[in-house]
Image: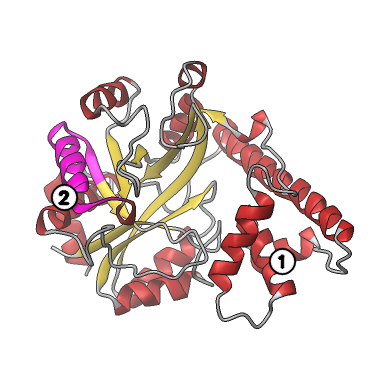
Amino acid sequence: MFDVNAHIHTPYSFSAFASVDEALDHAAAEGVKVVGINDFYSMDGYAAWKEGCAARGLFPLFGIEFISLNAEDQAAGLRVNDPNNPGRTYISGKGLACPPVLSGEALRQLEAVKAESNAQVERMCERLNQWLKGQGSTIQLDFQEIKAKLTQGSVRERHLAKALRMAMYPDSDEPAKIENDLRSKLLKAGGAAFVPESPEAFLPMETVQGIIEAAGGIPTYPFLADDAKGNFTDFEADLQKAADILKKRGFRSVEFITTRNTTAVLEQYAGYLEDEGFIVSFGSEHNTPAMEPVKLRTRDAEGLSPKLKAINWRGACAIAAHQAGLDSLAAGEDLILSSL
């Protein structure tokens, strides 16, 4: 049984890492043998991820992430896995085909939502420049330059915060803190440069599930579970009810970003969901400027408990089996072990 991190963002969306190679170097140095790329709206990093894993003796998993909208939950005012926006629902795909196989209408839908996401950030960049000018600053950000120099094609609001930090505080020894502060004060709701996303930025949940399946993957629901104050969203507070609804909606896979949760809650939620027949996997995201370990830990411990490690390993084996077109967890385990 090896350490697994099944959810890592790369510069193909936004990442603490400057490159795919840097992410994989960290994984190898920390002894994490099974690693999953999981960028927003993008499969563009798959080839580099696969090649980089092969060079380091790691086993690659291939994922993707979307922000979707469930109209029924929105109408009911139900907070799902976005604690601030009812109905807005993050969805991952696990075990996608590599090289990517998406085509036709599903590919068009993916490209359209990616383009709209970029357009929203471009509008935010324009508003940020207006605010800077109003403050008497000579700094002006060039969206196309940011896209060319700081991204691999997908532009997030965090890229604006990074570009502004580089312009204002190029020699700072606390870049992550400054970028987070700039994003919070200027680019989030209520900030001077905030631009709300248009409805085109959010595909319906069912459409996202269809795109993931067309790409060969498993639609996966990311649980928030307990926050720093021990609170849960409306949807997730009743675990049995949440599991039943997810099954009705066609989900058979869930994931957790382990640093959000206490060990006790993560063991409770992950263990229950695995017993209910869900594939359960864990990750770290790394989609903020802060550099954290690739080897997983919980909010109150420096690592995962033996129970959590075992759940994560079984989830990785199931995803690996799906990627390879196999039909059992044991087959996935054999595939991983024989590849390392």
Task: Determine whether the residue tagged by mark 2 lies in a helix, strand or loop.
Answer: helix
Q: Nearer the viewer, residue 23 or 89?
A: 89
Is 266 a magenta residue?
yes
Depicted 33 relative to depicted 110: above or below: below
Check disc 2: other Cα within 10 Å, few if <14, some if 14-19, many if 20+: some
Left or right side of 181 for 50: left
Q: Quadrant of the C terminus?
A: bottom left
Indicate the position of residue 270 as horizontal and vertical percent values.
Answer: 20, 43
Amino acid type of the residue tagged 2 in the rendering? Ile
Question: Residue at image x 33%, y 39%?
Answer: 231
Is 252 a magenta residue?
no
Q: Magenta residues: mostly which secondary structure?
A: helix
Left or right side of 287 for 123: right
Depicted 155 relative to depicted 106: above or below: below
Q: Are marks 2 and 1 in contact (CB under 8 Å)?
A: no
Check disc 1: other Cα within 10 Å, few if <14, some if 14-19, many if 20+: many
Indicate the position of residue 44 as horizontal and vertical percent values.
Answer: 54, 56
Mark before the other along the chain sequence, 2 or 1 = 1
Q: Which callout, 2 or 1, points to the residue nearer the camera?
A: 1
**Would you say residue 155 is visible in this rendering?**
no
Q: Which residue position is annotated with label 1?
A: 164
Indicate the position of residue 295 as horizontal and vertical percent values.
Answer: 28, 67
Q: Quadrant of the N terminus?
A: bottom left
**Would you say residue 315 is visible in this rendering?**
yes
Q: Which residue position is annotated with label 2?
A: 311
